[in-house]
Image (cartoon, helix red, strand yellow):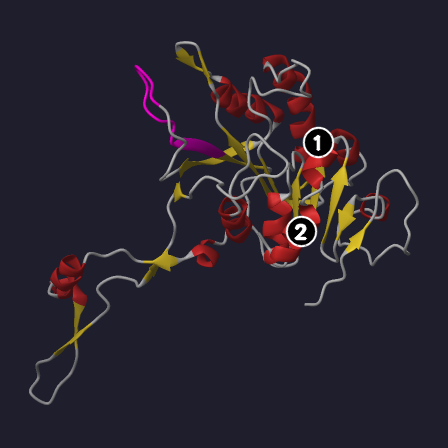
Amino acid sequence: MSQRVRYSTPVTSLLDPPGSAIPGIPPAISDSAFFRTEMGAFVVGDCLSTLRSIPDETFDLVVTSPPYDGQPKYGNGEKYERDWYADVFRAVSAEVLRTLKPHGSLVLNYRSKRHGDERGTLQYELVFWLRDQGFYFAEDYVWGKPSPPPGRFNRYLKDAVEYCFQFAKTPKWQLYPENCLSPARWDARDRERRKLLPHNYERVNEPSGQGRKRVQAGPDMVRPSTLLHFEPEFSPNPTLHPARFPLALPTFFIKLMTQPGQLVFDPFGGTGTTGVAAENLCRNWLVTELDPKYASVMPERIKSGR
């Protein structure tokens, strides 16, 4: 599908007429976006303000990674501490719950940092907070990084995992594992052994009265598991974003939990990775981000698809 990319700013009049409506996104939001395509919009601004202007039951999927605890806010010494999550983040998640469709899910990528001699527990508290709000804790996926950031620690190993918690609005969340099939990893020797097992044959009628036919010993393509193997994001980082996730991460969940034409949202959009993944997969999308510096790379990312 050909796409007309249009640039605008949230503080000045548009130089060209508003583009066609993006399904599910109020025109007032898409037309004032920093950047948009025919399928999505990147809004520079507070996600809560944007969410409060979104109608109920709008989004099919929300994929996001909020700032990690202890991460600097504005370069002035302030940090995202626990009270920010208890106050601001819970206000955001309440609006996410309202704006999700009944079949929709929130995928929350989060990993508590280590504080002194202990690993932070906020990653687990978030699960209980969102359940108290009315979310269903549908699944926990573990993102395993084959090449984690290097480091030498006296009593700890390299941190090679992060969580991706799936929260659903109702027990009827949509899931399309057939969109994420991968080649079966049967060992060659095991494959031959399985072919000889009795249950891998079925009887057939032959003139002699005897006969059997070999059947498939195991599927060639299989469903994914909840252990995800994705490398961290190693591509150039011109905006110096402190915690980017790889394009493969939102791509996986968008394929798993939506169909083409549905609407994906990321309230803590960073450099727009969720929007890039959605655009590549022909899903409509909305991304919000406070820092215009991070948004500046979005046009080139959409153009390159990376």
Q: Nearer the viewer, residue 290 or 202?
A: 290
| Residue at horizontal 37 percent and vertical 46 percent from the top | 225
As drawn, 103 above or below 216: above
Span of residues in magenta:
152-164
- For residue 157: magenta? yes
Q: Residue furthest top?
A: 116
Mark before the other along the chain sequence, 2 or 1: 1
Reading the image, the residue beneath label 2 is 300
- Left or right: 26 with respect to 78? right
Q: Position of residue 240 (x, y in %)?
A: 60, 33
User: Three-letter amino acid code at disc 1?
Assistant: Glu
Please give the residue where the numbered disc 1 appears in the rendered image: 95
Q: Is residue 223 left or right of residue 1?
A: left
Q: Work out how far the residue at label 2 is from the one at label 1, CA to CA, in angstroms.
A: 30 Å
- At a point 66% along the width and 58% down the height, the residue shown is 261
Instruction: Give the x, y percent position of residue 42.
Output: 73, 44
Quadrant of image for the N terminus: bottom right
Does dot 1 land on a helix, a strand or a loop?
Answer: helix
Q: In the picture shown, does residue 175 fall above or below 207?
A: above
The residue at the point 64 percent across, 55 percent down is 279
